[in-house]
Image (cartoon, rainbow, N blue to C red):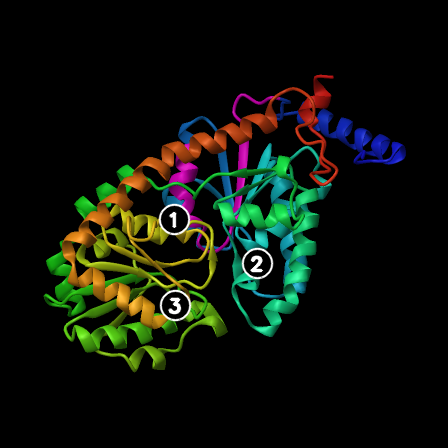
């Protein structure tokens, strides 16, 4: 079936011809020597700075926009345009965010805009509808709270979210998925056309940078002393301290592990106060003192991982491929994770770590105890996990995969997508060469 009626096809071609003229004016060209990429994310967008710098080294012009602190981007020498958005339900704020995004599009004039995170993946394609010359790439790095929570509100919102994703897909040129299960879900439920979707695992880990941070970081002995851990066995997690991230299950597991191994300490690294109603309370954490230590956000995560004995990732949240899990694997730690999508892309149960069901604190505790009890088996699993990350999730390989997507979007030739279930955004550069 044709994507457009004859009348609408004429309208689309007229719009694209005007877009082509805009592309050929000023700095814009149909096939630019240095494509300008605008990347949109949330408050933790700074974690992608190594990815952005790698793309810039490969010759792309890079601008970032998001709701996070501009300081890390400024220190990295990256052009950053702050916007505001509410990652919770807020239609009025969403309308403001769309207008802010459109203002950024006008000022930056990118060839490609790429979104990350749940809200931007819906708002960016909507904002880009009035800019048909811009190629739109969505990155589904997890499916968020709506598909993770079992609350009545989340269940009620799922049909709404599916409608939004179908519309966002029609206003996008391609959708990138970071794990197999999310890609399969979108395709099977008609949320994206198969010829408009691409699998690229993770956002890429800067292997050299991580190794450098380990080598230059504080020694395990000093970190243990600073945190009051002494020579205790340490189980660490790095995540937002929310219920969806499985922190209540981890706290219950900690109490069970302590009964068997009284000297164990659990270290929780990550934000809590910024997480609103989803956060676990400070009272819940205090109930498990002194064997649970919450450090808050830290900038020395690689060094903290090096001082630990086991990494636990109890998430109940639909992740993309969790960066914390990748970094823990690089540190050579034995891993315990849940069977949620994305985790099993990194951990193969019994080979490169242990997988347990989400919301199963007894299973989580048993897996932690096993790894603490059999250090040789734990070290072997950790080494295999590290090898997997270095082979499959390195930054150089990931940026190469993304560059291939960008190249296809900007290459001269016919429109990339022709499926009636796919994008309605015709290929501008294809029209230019016609």
Measure the alpha-carbon separation of dots 1 and 3. Answer: 23 Å
Q: On the image, numbered disc 2 is attached to which residue?
A: 85
As drawn, 288 above or below 112: below
Q: Decide if residue 258 is on the left or right side of residue 85.
A: left
- Residue drawn at x 71%, y 20% is 432
Earlier-in-chain disc, 2 versus 3: 2
Front one among 176 and 335 = 335
- Residue drawn at x 62%, y 55% is 97
**Magenta segment includes 28:** no
Q: On the image, numbered disc 1 is attached to which residue?
A: 72
Residue lying farthest top? Answer: 434
The spot of residue 371 in percent (x, y) is 21, 60
Which range is magenta?
A: 31-54
Q: Badge 2: few (under 14), some or many (20 or more) residues near its Cα, within 10 Å?
A: many
The spot of residue 80 in percent (x, y) is 48, 44
Q: Nearer the viewer, mark 1 or mark 3?
A: 3
């Amino acid at each position: 079936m044709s994507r457009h009626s004859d009348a609408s096809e004429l309208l689309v071609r007229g719009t694209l011809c005007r877009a082509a003229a805009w592309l050929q004016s000023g700095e814009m060209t149909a096939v630019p020597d240095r494509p300008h990429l605008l990347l949109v994310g949330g408050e933790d967008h700074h974690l992608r700075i190594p990815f952005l710098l790698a793309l810039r080294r490969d010759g792309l012009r890079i601008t970032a926009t998001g709701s996070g602190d501009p300081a890390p981007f400024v220190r990295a020498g990256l052009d950053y345009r702050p916007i505001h958005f509410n990652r919770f339900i807020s239609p009025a704020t969403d309308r403001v965010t769309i207008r802010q995004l459109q203002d950024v599009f006008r000022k930056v004039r990118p060839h490609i805009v790429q979104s990350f995170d749940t809200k931007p993946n819906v708002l960016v394609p909507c904002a880009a509808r009035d800019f048909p010359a811009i190629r739109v790439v969505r990155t589904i790095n997890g499916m968020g709270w709506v598909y993770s929570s079992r609350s009545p509100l989340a269940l009620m919102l799922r049909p709404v979210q599916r409608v939004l994703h179908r519309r966002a897909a029609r206003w996008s040129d391609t959708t990138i998925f970071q794990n197999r299960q999310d890609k399969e879900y979108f395709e099977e439920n008609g949320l994206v056309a198969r010829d408009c979707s691409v699998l690229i695992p993770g956002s890429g880990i800067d292997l050299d940078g991580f190794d450098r941070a380990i080598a230059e970081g504080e020694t395990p002995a000093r970190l243990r002393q600073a945190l009051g851990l002494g020579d205790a066995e340490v189980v660490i997690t790095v995540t937002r301290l929310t219920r969806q991230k499985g922190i209540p299950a981890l706290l219950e597991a900690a109490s069970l592990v302590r009964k068997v191994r009284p000297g164990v300490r659990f270290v929780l690294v990550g934000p809590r106060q910024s997480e609103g109603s989803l956060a676990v309370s400070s009272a819940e954490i205090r109930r498990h003192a002194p064997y649970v230590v919450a450090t808050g956000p830290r900038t020395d995560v690689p060094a903290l991982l090096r001082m630990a004995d086991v990494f636990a990732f109890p998430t109940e949240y639909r992740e993309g491929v969790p960066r914390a899990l990748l970094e823990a694997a690089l540190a050579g730690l034995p891993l315990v994770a849940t069977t949620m999508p994305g985790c099993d892309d990194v951990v193969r149960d019994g080979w490169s770590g242990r997988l347990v069901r989400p919301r199963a604190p007894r299973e989580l505790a048993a897996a932690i105890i096993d790894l603490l009890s059999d250090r040789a088996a734990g070290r072997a699993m950790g080494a295999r996990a590290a090898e997997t990350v270095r082979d499959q999730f390195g930054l150089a390989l990931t940026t190469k995969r993304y560059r291939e997507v960008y190249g296809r979007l900007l290459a001269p030739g016919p429109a990339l997508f022709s499926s009636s279930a796919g994008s309605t955004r015709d290929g501008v550069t294809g029209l230019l060469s016609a």
